[in-house]
Amino acid sequence: MEQLASREVYANDWMTVREDAVRRGDGSDGIYGVVDKPDYALIIPLDGDRLHLVEQFRYPLGLRRWEFPQGTAPGRADLAAPELAARELREETGLSAGSMVELGLLDVAPGLSSQRGRAFLATDLGEGEADREHEEQDMRTGWFHRAEFEAMIARGEITDAQSLAAYALLLLRERTTRGSDGLPSWG
């Protein structure tokens, strides 16, 4: 598909919406709407068998949702992914990680958005005070054993696609990177 022209139809500090005139592979013309957002970091804080989650109101859904800490913000678009991950973890939960291992790359909604994210596993955690953004003031946090986390997924209480995909990356890593003692090796 070839881009013929592009025009911005909306912009704010968090995103830009553009409409592109395109030429498809068969030669026909069309339009494509794209939401451009800065890349984000998602962090899975893991302490033994416990996961640390955040719960917040998600305005587009009109619901409160549990998910892993994640985000980006204006002015941080050029921040390296590991730095963004450390900042988001501290900002949303107050936690700091002695170890931060990248699990993989996630595309949020590639059919409509250019946003991509990096998932990280945070271990060797230290506690501190959260420093949330204004929009996150109603955020709650909590520790959940993995069995409870998985039960919440099964009950439809955790539906955040990025959190589910990141957890799948964690499970895959655990399955494929085991040390000689049979335990997961976070390398």
Image (cartoon, helix red, strand yellow):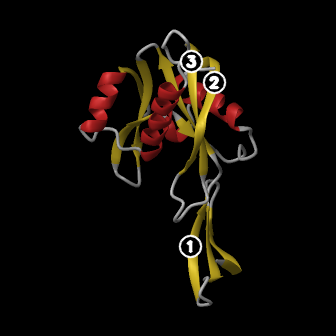
Please name which of the two marks, 3 or 1, marks the residue nearer to the observer.
Answer: 3
Q: Amino acid at mark 2?
A: Met
Disc 1 target residue = 33
Is residue 62 depicted above or below 141 in this figure? below
**In percent of the image, x 33 and y 46: which residue is there?**
63
**CB atoms at circles 1 and 2 under 8 Å apart?**
no
Mark 1 vs 2, N-terminal side = 1
The residue shown at (26%, 37%) is: 154
Q: Is residue 176 visible?
A: yes
Element class at badge 3: loop
| 42 is higher (above) or lower (below) than 176 | below
Where residue 155 sits, quadrant-wise, is top left
Q: Residue furthest front?
A: 180
Q: Amino acid at mark 1?
A: Gly
148 displayed left or right of 112: left
- Residue that numbered label 3 is attached to: 185
Task: Name the residue tied to disc 2.
Answer: 100
